[in-house]
Image: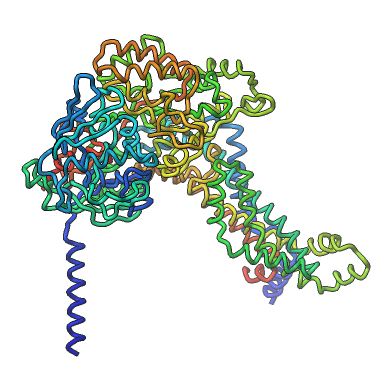
């Protein structure tokens, strides 16, 4: 009897727990922060000039391994070097945060555009709504990789920021549609009606009254968008498009494939960036799941 | 009922027949060669127009050359021609043809075909292949003496006429076309499909990624006793698509001859498949290619129209690093523009003695001093600027091979570290050769367009004379002087080179004249020689033996050249 009571009480207590102390969110954020830390610590502790072509011996394996020529790994290049004489540690210390950066920037711009357009469409309605809706519906059917491949081949060597901007051009449609749907349903709620009646200006209602209610939802959507943007960016890089002198994980994989790293058993060249990408995606997935549970309390209860 | 049965039977028979045809040739009877590019138009065999129309087997299996330069002996091996001789002045040449040569459709190959094809090249300005352009520039008239004798009268004496046009010195030769097929066609647009030739193989099928050729049992050479029929029943040129798939195809015996791979990739292939061989048994394995690599500079685009800026780039480039990083030590830095064959040594030595030799290492400070003398100052970002504008350069590079892209990656890195904001522009093979290089649509690019000389200096040097200068946007004749080098120094250079062109090959004054002309090249650097080229071609002895190698040196192993007829005749089944 007492046991049942305490369990029920504990359950009741838990319902008032801070939803942000979510283990999935923590693990995911931890993984992402680890990659950021790799970049920060790398910049502090490692000679990043080693990232340039020809600054180290070619094809050295990580410490404790031997390459096909029988050369052992050396402490000067603890996780090996690639086929153009670039130090792998320097490469990932710069490349991994770069890849994350492109994803975040593209998603940030895409979400920003999505929020403005989604709110405008949903709240203002009429012709504006029609225009934005048709535009995003049309754009959503276009496969982004196809267009971006053409764009980037035409641009030649692009910077990370331009690449992020290009990707952002394909990252605003889904947020626009989703936010518009949310706004349409929210528009009918009491507090919005109240604000309208009291004569608050449109932008005030949109961004002061409605937006805060969408924050957890927007976060989840943002993280999902980051994942998509990184997938697109890596897809382009693995095809050899994207920036050339600035290291990214995708570019490293492209270099490895085009230089025949598989048959030469240079597993560290393509393996390490692949593992890092996997870590990045798992981190993003966990953060996304965590945010889902925060914005949707039912999921939280199901989980326990 | 009866009709239906017959129909079924007939279709079954037809199926059997096609099945039998398709499987007629076993892997043991087939040689599969690597093709490093896409065939844009597999139904066009007009080799006189630009595009991949020869190296997919057409000039290795179907069209035969008149002569083949033997890189081992330095002699012209006779093929469709038996002899070619000049008069004392060197401006009238007489060609003797082999008796009994037939086209694969049974028509005789004779002097009429030669005269017809040469006239075709001479009278059509719009056909642009290098070989046709060279003949057009050199020949004044051509006439048939009898069925097997042709006489050429040249515009000027040319002691190299035979080897230059008909000897497969570099890549191709002037190919003779059948008059009975080409007569009345517009040579600029004629597709020549289906193609015929005099070679022992005929065209079977083609697509953008492969070409298949089957043995012609009625080949003239076997009938007349010129040579036995070659052993392979089928030849395939297959686009392998990159180092990784090339290596896998070789390791698993799905290919018999592969294009250039890196030293590391070759060692990995051989670890998996001990039947793979290359030119040398041991490091560096590769054979020397006659086309030394260079950085081509468009001399009409500022600031690179200034010779001092071009010399600065020359100082900044570290050739040893290119050798070590881009080609993994398999070659050596260039000392001059010439290929470093023993036969070229007198000319290379003369250039070096005159003080125009190239340094294997960089002298960045000297390069930077030259740049600063032009009014550039180093910006806070480590890049030179003048009047608020960064010093930048875009280097076009053919993306078909990692050798090309990696070399340019290294140079881009060297330039950036010295303060030049360089970036590479990888472009597809067809675009690179079809649009970028000939029309001057670049600032700098990676090429080997001074290629040509193998035993005398004139051919390479003659490719940068002022007579071949055309404005940007027009096609450079035969890829000559794509740098559009047209200064006063270029005129002086051209004058000496033109004089050299009329002299005998072994004239003792030549080395000195080379050094004299080279002074202008060294001063103005319309192109910057980089490194010698080495080709590491993995060859598979699982099904076929008799590949060329340093021990079995009947000729070089570049199986995309017109001389590949010799390789195919030397192949014997391994079992």
Going 27% across and 37% down the picture, which residue do you hit?
B174
Percent of width and height locating residue A146? 53, 56
Going 19% across and 76% down the picture, which residue do you hit?
B12
Percent of width and height locating residue B183? 27, 49
Taking the view exactly as shown, the residue that stands out farthest to the right is A198
Callout count: 0
For the question of whether residue B573 can be seen, the reply is no
Q: Compared to B195, does A293 lie above or below?
A: below
Percent of width and height locating residue B480? 40, 30
For the question of whether residue A237 can be seen, the reply is yes
Percent of width and height locating residue A57? 42, 29
* Rendered image quadrant of residue B337: top left
Q: Quarter of the image for the N terminus of chain B: give it.
A: bottom left
Does residue B448 appear to the left or right of A214 in the view shown? left
Going 54% across and 24% down the picture, which residue do you hit?
B305
Q: Nearer the viewer, residue B110 or A167?
A: B110
Q: Nearer the viewer, residue B174 or B537?
A: B174
């Amino acid at each position: 009897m007492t046991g049942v009571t305490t369990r029920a009480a504990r359950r009741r207590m838990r319902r008032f727990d801070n939803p942000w102390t979510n283990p999935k969110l923590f693990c995911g954020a931890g993984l992402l922060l680890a990659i950021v830390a790799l970049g920060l610590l790398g910049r502090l502790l490692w000679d990043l000039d080693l990232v340039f072509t020809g600054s180290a011996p070619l094809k050295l394996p990580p410490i404790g391994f031997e390459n096909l020529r029988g050369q052992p790994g050396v402490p000067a290049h603890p996780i090996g070097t690639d086929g153009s004489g670039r130090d792998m540690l320097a490469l990932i210390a710069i490349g991994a945060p770069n890849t994350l950066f492109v994803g975040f920037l593209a998603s940030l711009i895409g979400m920003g555009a999505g929020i403005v357009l989604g709110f405008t469409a949903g709240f203002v309605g009429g012709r504006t709504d029609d225009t934005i809706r048709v535009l995003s519906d049309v754009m959503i059917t276009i496969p982004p990789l196809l267009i971006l491949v053409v764009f980037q081949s035409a641009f030649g060597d692009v910077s990370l920021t331009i690449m992020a901007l290009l990707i952002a051009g394909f990252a605003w449609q889904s947020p626009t549609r989703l936010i518009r749907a949310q706004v349409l349903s929210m528009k009918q709620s009491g507090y919005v009606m109240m604000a309208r009646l009291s004569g608050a200006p449109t932008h005030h209602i949109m961004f002061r009254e409605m937006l805060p209610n969408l924050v957890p939802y927007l976060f989840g959507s943002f993280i999902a968008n980051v994942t998509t943007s990184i997938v697109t960016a890596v897809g382009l890089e693995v095809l050899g498009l994207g920036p050339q002198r600035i290291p990214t994980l995708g570019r490293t994989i492209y270099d490895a494939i085009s230089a025949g790293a598989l048959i030469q058993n240079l597993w560290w060249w393509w393996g390490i960036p692949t593992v890092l990408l996997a870590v990045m995606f798992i981190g993003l997935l966990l953060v996304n799941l965590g945010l889902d549970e925060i914005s949707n309390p039912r999921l939280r209860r199901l989980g326990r | 009922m009866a009709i239906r049965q017959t129909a079924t039977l007939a279709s079954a028979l037809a199926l059997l027949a096609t099945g039998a045809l398709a499987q007629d040739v076993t892997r043991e009877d087939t040689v599969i060669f690597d093709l490093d590019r896409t065939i844009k138009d597999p139904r066009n065999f007009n080799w006189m127009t630009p595009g991949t129309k020869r190296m997919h087997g057409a000039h290795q299996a179907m069209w035969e050359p008149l002569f083949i330069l033997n890189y081992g002996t330095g002699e012209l091996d006779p093929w469709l021609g038996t002899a070619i001789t000049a008069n004392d002045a060197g401006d009238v040449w007489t060609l003797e043809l082999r008796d009994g040569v037939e086209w694969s459709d049974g028509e005789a190959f004779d002097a009429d075909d030669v005269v017809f094809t040469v006239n075709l090249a001479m009278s059509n300005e719009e056909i642009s292949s290098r070989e046709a352009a060279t003949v057009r520039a050199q020949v004044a008239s051509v006439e048939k003496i009898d069925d097997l004798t042709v006489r050429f009268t040249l515009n000027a004496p040319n002691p190299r006429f035979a080897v230059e046009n008909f000897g497969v010195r570099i890549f191709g030769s002037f190919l003779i076309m059948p008059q009975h097929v080409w007569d009345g066609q517009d040579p600029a647009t004629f597709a020549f499909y289906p193609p015929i030739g005099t070679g022992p193989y005929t065209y079977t099928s083609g697509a953008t990624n492969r070409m298949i050729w089957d043995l012609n049992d009625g080949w003239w050479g076997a009938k007349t006793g010129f040579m036995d029929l070659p052993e392979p029943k089928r030849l395939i040129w297959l686009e392998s698509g990159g180092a990784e798939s090339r290596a896998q195809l070789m390791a698993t015996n799905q290919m018999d001859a592969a294009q250039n791979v890196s030293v590391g990739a070759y060692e990995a292939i051989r670890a998996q498949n001990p039947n793979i061989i290359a030119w040398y048994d041991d490091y560096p394995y590769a054979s020397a290619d006659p086309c030394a690599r260079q950085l081509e500079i468009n001399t009409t685009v500022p600031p690179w129209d200034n010779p001092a800026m071009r010399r600065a780039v020359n100082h900044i480039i570290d050739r040893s690093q290119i050798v070590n990083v881009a080609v993994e030590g398999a070659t050596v830095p260039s000392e001059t523009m010439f290929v470093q064959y023993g036969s070229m040594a007198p000319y290379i030595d003369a250039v070096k003695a005159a003080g125009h030799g190239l340094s294997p290492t960089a002298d960045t400070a000297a390069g930077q001093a030259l740049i600063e003398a032009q009014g550039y100052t180093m910006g806070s970002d480590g890049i030179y600027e003048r009047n608020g504008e960064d010093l930048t350069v875009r280097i076009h590079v053919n993306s078909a091979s990692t050798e090309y892209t990696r070399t340019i990656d290294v140079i881009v890195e060297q330039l950036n570290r010295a303060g030049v904001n360089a970036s590479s522009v990888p472009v597809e093979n067809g675009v690179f050769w079809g649009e970028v290089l000939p029309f001057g649509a670049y600032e700098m690019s990676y090429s080997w367009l001074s290629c040509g000389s193998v035993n005398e200096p004139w051919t390479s040097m003659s490719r940068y004379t002022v007579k071949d200068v055309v404005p940007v946007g027009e096609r450079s004749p035969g890829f000559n002087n794509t740098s559009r080098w047209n200064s006063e120094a270029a005129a002086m250079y051209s004058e000496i080179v033109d004089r050299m062109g009329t002299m005998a090959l072994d004239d003792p004054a030549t080395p000195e004249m080379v050094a004299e002309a080279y002074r202008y090249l060294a001063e103005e650097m319309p192109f910057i020689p980089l490194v010698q080229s080495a080709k590491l071609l993995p060859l598979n002895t699982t099904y076929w033996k008799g590949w060329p190698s340093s021990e079995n040196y009947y000729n070089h192993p570049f199986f995309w050249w017109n001389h590949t007829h010799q390789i195919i005749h030397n192949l014997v089944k391994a079992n």
